[in-house]
Amino acid sequence: MTQEESAVNYMNYLAIDELLELQRPVSEGPEHDEMLFIVIHQVYELWFKQILHEIDALKRALQAHDGFDAAAKLNRIKQILAVCIRQIDVLITMTPLQFGAFRDRLESASGFQSAQFREVEAVFGRRDLHSAQHLLPKNRVRVEQRMQEESLWDCVLQYVNWCGFTIPVDVLERDFSQPYESREEVRGALLELHRTHHAAMSICEQLVDVEVSLKEWRYRHVMMVERTIGTKSGTGGSSGAGYLNSTLSNPRSFPELWEIRSSF
């Protein structure tokens, strides 16, 4: 290998050659739109990886009582979700006929099997081990581990308590593997925080923004599936749009932040 080849450059730093070999259509021809389908979903997985990276850093910032860094990380997550939503506009340029030309070749492959998105759901508070049962063992372990750890909301409540707004000890020291349950004492603390602590209030409002963005992505995803396959069953054994519609009513990730809206 020459010195020029071993030096860090754009191509080898980003592993561009390897990256561009990762799109492997399986349809005969292959069908033109399969490339778009693959690229879009690979990009989603990269964004999910980055979201998890940012949330892990966000949790550390909250635990270190660094509100400035926490707010910056939340803003970045919100901007990433905005890009994820915008990608759907690209995907829906593919018509039902174009998708149907290669859909059967996907066999059991489905976004339902995205382990990273299950991890994202877990850090946002989902506690449902059944949701990971269909994953490969190594991926299932990662998701289950996330469900044993503090959720993002748990870390926020620890930060709120540190800011001087008392959160009950049994909330702070709860079993993190169990679903979070809304508490009146937490609502009271958050109301006082919103009225008297602008910096912490700003973090709470960005959390609401992030949850709205995640909900919008889910909604746009449902609409995209319905316009592409209608009421057909999804690949991978899901019910397609029916299953996705059911996720729109998932419990709030930050319940008390929504419940206090009617108290201002």
Image: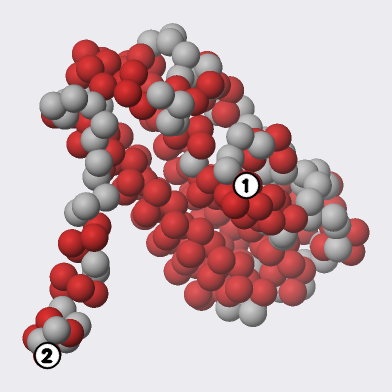
Q: Name the residue type under label 1.
A: Pro
Closer to the camera in the image, 37 or 251: 37
Residue 250 rendering spot, x and y as whole percentages: 63, 32
Name the image quarter holding residue 16: bottom left
Q: Is residue 53 above or below residue 61?
A: above
Q: Is residue 100 above or below residue 149?
A: above
Callout 1 secondary element: helix
Closer to the camera in the image, 33 or 207: 33
Q: Earlier in the sequence, mark 2 or mark 1?
A: 2
Q: Image point 85% across, 57% down: which residue?
A: 174
Q: Image point 69% across, 69% down: which residue?
A: 159
Residue 252 in view of the camera: no
Where does label 2 land, which residue? 3
Residue 37 in view of the camera: yes
Q: Image point 12% across, 90% down: which residue?
A: 3
Q: Image point 51% across, 59% down: which residue?
A: 52
How many residues crowd around disc 2 within 10 Å: few (fewer than 14), some, or many (20 or more)?
few
Q: Are marks 2 and 1 in contact (CB under 8 Å)?
A: no
Closer to the camera in the image, 14 or 243: 14
Q: Is residue 204 above or below residue 247?
A: below
Furthest toward the right, the residue is 170
Residue 80 rendering spot, x and y as whole percentages: 37, 54
Where does label 1 land, which residue? 137
Name the image quarter holding residue 134: top right
How many residues crowd around disc 1 within 10 Å: few (fewer than 14), some, or many (20 or more)?
few
Residue 88 rendering spot, x and y as whole percentages: 30, 34
Disc 2/disc 1 C-alpha distance (Å): 42 Å
Judged left or right of residue 102, residue 172 is: right
Identify the mark at residue 161; answer none if there is no mark.
Answer: none
Q: Name the residue type under label 2.
A: Gln
Furthest toward the front, the residue is 1
Residue 1 rendering spot, x and y as whole percentages: 14, 84
